[in-house]
Image: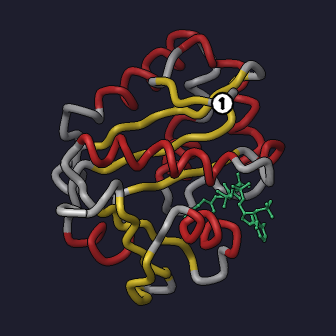
Amino acid sequence: MARFVVPDVSLKDSFLAAMAEFAAEGRTGDGSGLGRDLDEWTGRWESDEGFAEYVAARVAERDTVVDEDWVLNTNLWWVDEKGYIGRMSVRHELNAWLREVGGHIGYDVRRSRRREGHATAMLAAALPVARALGIDRALVTCDVGNVGSRVVIERNGGVPAGERDGKLRFWVPTGPAAGS
Ligand SMILES: CC(C)(COP(=O)(O)OP(=O)(O)OC[C@H]1O[C@@H](n2cnc3c(N)ncnc32)[C@H](O)[C@@H]1OP(=O)(O)O)[C@@H](O)C(=O)NCCC(=O)NCCS
């Protein structure tokens, strides 16, 4: 059964195979966190040392502010017995851009494992993570045309909150409302 794990060097082979699938979709440098990783780490994370550095950098974002425009961020990988399936990142707070466009939670599922319910299950599993960080309702956004992601958010109880810069915004309760 699929589950979250903290990024780990043991997942190198399946992680790199997944990244090749994302690169083949044109994700390199597309402005997303995944696109930035493809841009910055391709050519480095293929070696054991480079991959260990990459993994350490992703884990460190949980408690180290890496850039003044960045907020603390918990990165988790969704895996099963076949290895890496996808990733989820939960931002611990919203800065001005995240509040409008980026949201609290971002996710990607590798192409070869889509339409198996993984994104829906990953977002459901991320909500208690967000709640434990003190987030009562998580802002989750998707491109206006991203039907799959919109369904994933709606299946997790997302309440529409308008559109900004071509992104649909939703507030997703992370647990029972206070007092209910
Ligand atoms: C969007 C994405 C995360 C969906 O992942 P997934 O694991 O395939 O999603 P699920 O299997 O949980 O799909 C849930 C439902 O969404 C709908 N859906 C998913 N992909 C779809 C697509 N390409 N077109 C139309 N509907 C789609 C389906 O109704 C699906 O349920 P069903 O398979 O029972 O019919 C994945 O396609 C992805 O990583 N895309 C690229 C990156 C991205 O868009 N990330 C999200 C940024 S907000």
111 or 131, which lies in front? 131
Looking at the rendered structure, the secondary structure element under dot 1 is: loop
Q: Quadrant of residue 74?
A: top left
Please indicate whether residue 157 sits to the left or right of residue 10 in the image: left
85 or 39, which lies in front? 85
Q: Is residue 62 above or below residue 108?
A: above
Q: In which quarter of the image is residue 103?
A: bottom left
Structure colour scheme = secondary structure
Q: Quadrant of the C terminus?
A: bottom left
Residue 117 % position (x, y): 72, 50
Q: Quadrant of residue 10?
A: top right
94 or 31, which lies in front? 94
Residue 138 % position (x, y): 34, 62
Please indicate whether residue 22 sits to the left or right of residue 174 in the image: right
Which residue is the site of mark 1?
2
Q: Is residue 14 above or below residue 18?
A: above
Write the residue at 43% across / 78% down.
Answer: 159
Write the residue at 69% across / 27% down.
Answer: 1
Residue 82 % position (x, y): 77, 22
Write the residue at 47% across / 55% down.
Answer: 106
Which residue type does callout 1 highlight? Answer: Ala
The number of callouts visible is 1
**What residue occupies the far front of the structure in this picture?**
180
Q: In which quarter of the image is ligand 1?
A: bottom right
Write the residue at 36% across / 27% down.
Answer: 59
The answer to whether the residue bearing label 1 lies less than 8 angstroms from the nearest atom of ligand 1 is no
175 or 89, which lies in front? 175
Please indicate whether residue 160 sits to the left or right of residue 113 in the image: left
Please indicate whether residue 100 sits to the left or right of residue 146 in the image: left
